[in-house]
């Protein structure tokens, strides 16, 4: 249960960050930033697995 709460908070934080970038700079920059962050997370997750 603790892990689910942590995961939900992480997703909410990621959504807030992406939303803020979208409001400040527009859609293309927002998609590039969120894609880079997801790629980095995938690399870290595969390294720690």
Image: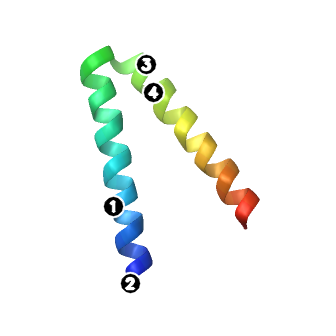
CA neighbours of label 2 inside 10 A, class few (<14), some (14 to 19), many (20+): few
Mark 4 residue element:
helix
Asked if 19 appears above or below 23 in the picture, the reply is below
Pointer 3 with pointer 4, Cβ within 8 A: yes
**Can you tell which quarter of the image residue 8 is in?**
bottom left
Judged from the image, the secondary structure of the residue bearing numbered disc 1 is: helix
Q: Sequence-wise, which precedes: disc 4 or disc 2?
A: 2
Report the residue at 57% width, 33% height from top: 36
* Residue lying at 43% horizontally and 19% vertically, measured from the top left: 29
CA gap, disc 3 to disc 2? 34 Å
Where is residue 22 drawn, in percent x and y? 31, 24
The tag earlier along the polypeptide, 1 or 2, is 2
**Which mark sits nearer the N-terminus, 3 or 2?**
2
Residue 44 percent coordinates (x, y) = 67, 53
In whole angstroms, how far apart are the C-alphas of marks 4 and 2? 31 Å
The residue indicated by pointer 2 is: 1
- Comes first in the chain, label 1 or label 3: 1
Q: Residue at x 50, y 25 (%)?
A: 32
Locate residue 30 relative to residue 16 in the image: left or right: right
Which label belongs to residue 29?
3
Give the Cα distance between marks 1 and 3.
Answer: 23 Å
Which quadrant of the rendered structure holds the N terminus? bottom left
């Amino acid at each position: 249960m603790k892990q689910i709460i942590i995961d939900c908070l992480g997703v909410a934080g990621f959504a807030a960050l992406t939303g803020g970038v979208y409001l400040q700079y527009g859609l293309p920059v927002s998609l590039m930033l969120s894609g880079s962050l997801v790629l980095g997370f995938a690399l870290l997750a595969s390294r720690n697995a």
